[in-house]
Amino acid sequence: MADIKPPRGSRDLRKNRSTEKDAAPKLSNFAVFGDSVWALVLSSLLLLVAVATSLWIDHSAAGDGDGIVDLYTQLGPVPVIDPPQIFDILQLDAITDEILSAYKKDGVVAVRGLIEPEVMDRLDAEANVFLEEQRRKNDGHKRPGTQFHTVHHNAIFRHPPDNTTISPWVEVTLRSRVPQFAAELLGMRQLDSNQTMRMLRDIFLAKDDDQYTCGWHVDDFGFWPATAESPGVNAWVALDDMPVDQGGGFALAIASHQAPWREEAHYVTGASTTFPAQGYTSADDMIANRPGKGTCNLKYSAPHLHKRMEETKRIYPVKRGDVIFHERWLFHRTVPFDRAFVAEHQNEDVIYRRYSIRYGPGSSVIPPGYGTELSVLSDERNGGRTADEVTRFDGPWYPQAWPSASDNELRDLRQLVENRVPTADLRRTTLKKEMKPLLKRLARKQNKPLI
């Protein structure tokens, strides 16, 4: 290697130095810019800045980590979660104390055999029509970063009953053993004999191979149109077999509906339990004043709670026709498909379909204020009314499912769908367009997805 001449001025510096032992450290050993006086000064300053920055980063990281660890520690020990069990109702004939006890403790039970095979076949065919409509709409250009391939609210409005036919959506939602089972879990038999249970919302969803999913959450008014004081149970019907190792299914945070930290989780996700009693007045009001960082963002807003839910999650190995019943306030999330499974089926449509039905007492109050609820968009006076009152004054927006379906309401449902729903649905589309840029702006501000 060629000799490198020292910088000008370094020779004089070396001449004036006193002789030291070779083993002693020299200041020049730390030089970055050379060993002139000014170079050594600059190197020293750089070293001090580096050391100070390192100490600050270490302190900040330790502080954040200690804070998260401390918050997590305050949650207490991780509860023991039983493995998933699917109760076969064909072998039990009726709901049992074991099922009721499991639901009360965990906030969820899975049941097999509630829907007749013939009804499942019809449901399967209707679901495929929804998929085909979505494929035509996408025209080969599905927008990435969307949780579901397609979402259809109010499927029972799709083909309202006539004198000769009942759609499978109506059959399952109002006339099968599903609502009877839901009523038992809600404790309807122990209530006043005049009490009813109603279908508050039904939604068909199809999960594809997009890796985006909404994080741990409870459903807000857009998916569960009843004020926070109103109890409810969700019947989640699997329309396909969903092996756990393939993903694409449904995860539930066991007993989170009664966990001591649930209110914090509601706040940081802006759940409907945090909404003002009279609702928000506009989209701007909701965006400006809704607490938390979005329904789907628990992982970012409260990582200690996200970790606890991950540790207490249960995923059922459901088969076609199985029904997962879960309490309204049980935290849950969709499971993305396993990447290896998707890679193995890259030339196929990887889609799992499910049908979700939200039941609540007829005394459930429909939320007032700004929102996208069809009954309120049709007549704002429905906001603040109970589901029973809405039906009495304005028609079967929330059809009776227990003690049985009402023949009168089923007859009126067709008139409602034909004459009232289209106008309300058009208004809902307009409101969604109004909300979309506000959500995008807020998401950019937070640098996180917002749903």
Image (cartoon, rainbow, N blue to C red):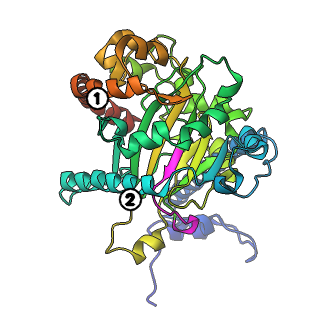
Q: Is 241 one of the magenta-colored residues? A: yes
Viewed as shown, does residue 380 lie left or right of 300?
Answer: left
For the point 55% across and 17% down, the residue is: 363
Query: Which of 80/51 is in front?
Result: 80
Tell me if mark 1 has few (under 14), some (14-19) or many (20+) residues whose alpha carbon lies within 10 angstroms of its own.
Answer: some
For the point 44% across and 68% down, the residue is: 8
Q: Earlier in the sequence, mark 1 or mark 2?
A: 2
Identify the image quadrant of the C terminus.
Answer: top left
Viewed as shown, does residue 181 lie left or right of 116?
Answer: right
For the point 31% across and 29% down, the residue is: 438
Viewed as shown, does residue 421 lie left or right of 270?
Answer: left
In the picture shown, does residue 408 fall above or below 120?
Answer: above
Q: Is 359 one of the magenta-colored residues? A: no
Query: Which of 121/367 is in front?
Result: 121
Q: Secondary structure at mark 2?
A: loop
Q: x, y (%) of residue 184? A: 66, 35
Q: Secondary structure at mark 1?
A: helix
Q: What's the distance in space between the residues labelled 1 and 2, CA to CA? A: 32 Å
Write down the region rendered in magenta: 236-246
From the image, tell me which residue sits under label 1.
414
Q: x, y (%) of residue 16? A: 62, 65
In the picture shown, does residue 280 fall above or below 411?
Answer: above
Instruction: Find residue 449 and report its image quarter.
Output: top left
From the image, tell me which residue sits under label 2.
208
Name the amino acid type tagged 1: Arg
Name the amino acid type tagged 2: Asp
Q: x, y (%) of residue 307? A: 66, 49
Query: Which of 232/310 is in front?
Result: 232
Asked if residue 449 can be seen in this view, the reply is no
Tell me if mark 2 has few (under 14), some (14-19) or many (20+) residues whose alpha carbon lies within 10 angstroms of its own.
Answer: many
Kindly check if marks 1 and 2 are in contact, taking CB atoms under 8 A apart as contact: no
For the point 68% across and 20% down, the residue is: 191
